Image (spheres, helix red, strand yellow):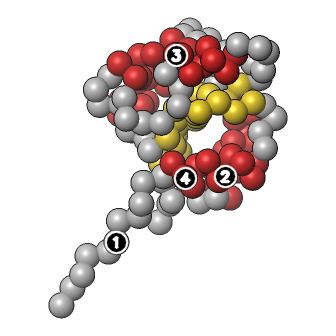
Amino acid sequence: MPKGRLLIVEDNLDNLTLLQDVLRALDYEFRIAKDGEAGLSVARDYVPDVILMDMSLPKMDGWTATRHLKADPALKHVPVIAITAHAMRGDRERALEAGCDFYMTKPLNLREFAQKLKDLMPPPVPPPVTS
């Protein structure tokens, strides 16, 4: 049984491949969207436990997509992790102001990333007790 459900919103094939490989190795289930508009659509249908959001995306950037996610009553509780190459002064604050709950820069520290996912996942549901 997977440890949790994630949505990856990423348009760069190399970054997407890395995230997929890491999430498979950590036993997470995930869906993919390659732009901000698709990310909103997939999030509404899939309702993940955590969203991994690139900030530089086609059609709708990650800042705008995150604002829409956090304005949606059905999704505002879902933690959004900004995963971005934007590491200049003010970029972290800009992501947090848009509604991202956490900010991580590329290349990812995989140990820190794995721990953050573990911390954000809801507790496992115990199997039903049978008598």
Cα distance, mark 3 to mark 1? 35 Å
Q: Which residue is drawn at 75% across and 30% down?
A: 105
**Mark 1 — residue?**
126
User: Distance between the Cα atoms at labels 2 and 4?
Assistant: 9 Å
Q: Helix, strand, or loop for circle 2?
A: helix
Local crowd size for mark 1, using a 10 Å CA cut-off: few (<14), some (14–19), many (≥20): few
SS under mark 3 = helix
Q: Distance between the residues labelled 4 and 3?
A: 22 Å
Circle 1 SS class:
loop
Which of the two discs, 1 and 4, labels the residue nearer the N terminus?
A: 4
Q: Cβ–Cβ below 8 Å for labels 1 and 4?
A: no
For the residues labelled 1 and 4, the Cα–Cα distance comes to 18 Å
Circle 2 or circle 4, nearest the eye: 4
Residue sticking out furthest to the top? 59
Mark nearer the N terminus (2 vs 4) = 2
Circle 3 Cα neighbour tier, 10 Å, few/some/many (<14 / 14–19 / ≥20): some
Q: Which of marks 1 and 2 is nearer the N terminus?
A: 2
Look at mark 3 in the image and give the residue it sits on: 98
Q: What residue type is labelled 1?
A: Pro
